Amino acid sequence: MNLDSLKFYSLVSRWTFPKTYPGKIMLVAFIGTHIPLIVLIIDAAFSSATTPRAIVSTLIITLIATLVGTAATLYAIHHLLSPVVLTSKVLRKYLKQRQRTNLPNNFQDEVGTLMADTNRTLGKLDEIIEHLTDYDSLTGLPNRELFQTHLQQAIQTTAEDQQFALIVLDIDSLKEINSTLGRIVGDLLLRKVAQRIISYIEPGDVVARFGGDEFAILRTNIINSDSAIILSNRLLESLSEPFSLYGKEIHCAAKIGITIYPFDGTSIEQLLQNADTAIHQAKQESLNTYQFYSPAINAQLKRILAIKENLRHALKRQELSIYYQPRIEIATSRLVAVEALLRWQNPELGFVSPAEFIPIAEETNLIMPIGEWVLYNACLQNKRWQQEGIAPLRMSVNLSIGQFKQTTLIETIDRILRDTNLDVAYLELEITESLLVKNVEQAIAILRELKKRGISIALDDFGTGYSSLSYLQKLPIDTLKIDRSFVTNIASNPDDAAISKAIVALAQSLELNITAEGVETKAQYHYLQNQGCHEVQGYYFSKPLPSEQLKKFVLSYCGSR
């Protein structure tokens, strides 16, 4: 572009009067049209060739002609500038109010081309803005807002005897892929996923990306749910196939939630909420699965949400408490240990089972402060009992997976023992097999550190998880606990009896203490006694008790021996 052509414009633009651009053009035109008159006046002033009367007459005639010509010129220029002024107004209105006015496009000169180009440019801008507003920039699919518009149309146009399916699909492992391989790889994966989904779409279907790792499909005019099941199975099978991205083979899986109109809802909000409920349930199942919405699932999820919300405040509101269940040594009938069991009583939810809230505490990372609170108070209570004259007992406290992942676990335990002044000989930490699965070597290293300090280690729920002799013999554990599921029918079910017998034999060969949980009958107790089990705990002796009741039990139990 030749900027020299703007020099005169640059000069004129600095004028403070007139203020408007058309006014400046008209001033320039006015001055230009009056140059002949000015020259004539100067010439007449210095000329003596004619009489003064003739000079005045000539000047008057010239002045009138100049004024008429000037007015005509200014009028013409004003109207010639109208297309430029109108184009400017249209652009300002579009930029400020996003309102577009079509300019005339039937002129062939430069100004006509300017107006036509402005029309096309604003039209393209409208298309781009509409696309950015209604479509996902990464995959090019409709976004949630546009999908909801299609969903509303489907609700309004679907006849009473017709159905449609809303299918929500969630991609697993996207966060892990983004964090390990980078967001570029993750974004490419989403585009590839979108392409695979589109390849299974039929005419009339609408597919959208809701954001993150979530996609949605609207399949209209279905006869029954079979169409949604077939599509879901095809999508799950397709997405289970590896993706080749930047020379890497990436595997991912998906979960699908399905709602059917009108059975699962008759509004956008109901259908989307119930689809989320269904997909949440699918996430609880195995990989690559779909789940239909059901009211029972909805009620379950509402309770989970209520537990999550209330659990965040349970410690601060002092809703948590610890109960203690005695553990009896079979050979001597002595009370040798108690297990600390967490309890939660909430004003809104009532008593919440640990089986319900412990997994949620793990999921939300609340298990770390709660677990530390349990360990501290259990150690403190054990020390208080000793100070009150009760014979020293081992206090058995469960360690969660979340606690075990903490890099400060050893320091936390050391600090609690120091703060409560409890001898390490009276602390036992219980771990489960599931805690050892992901990193056995790291777990063994942590357990060895605990063992060095003189803390007893018990392996809880043995036989229900991922038992392996190869790591069991490496674990620095003192006690093997037989899960209550094998004890319940131990005296009547040969299979349970055989498993318990095998566990006892295994523990004996490894020279481990053997404790059986869930002992509720005399028959169970005698069977375990005959098999060589060392310790038992369960309702046969006592249910879990609050600290004061446990103290009374200890005194009465020891007094009766």
Image (cartoon, grey):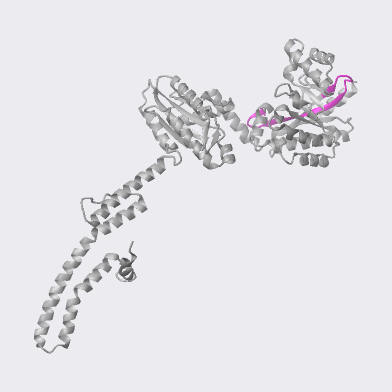
Instruction: Give the residues in magenta.
Output: 327-351
Asked where in the image residue 158 lies, by quadrant, the reply is top left
Q: In percent of the image, x 17 and y 77: which residue is there?
A: 36
Does residue 329 show up? yes
Relative image position of residue 510 (x, y in whole percent): 82, 23
Is-magenta flag for residue 256? no
- On the picture, is 206 further left or further right than 450? left
Relative image position of residue 441 (x, y in whole percent): 74, 33
Is-magenta flag for residue 332? yes
- On the picture, is 346 further left or further right than 250? right
Relative image position of residue 315 (x, y in whole percent): 70, 38
- On the picture, is 223 further left or further right than 344? left
Residue 492 vertical placement versus 392 (above, below): above
What secondary structure is the magenta-colored segment mainly? strand
Q: In percent of the image, x 18 and y 64: which residue is there?
A: 76
Residue 14 vertical placement versus 472 (above, below): below
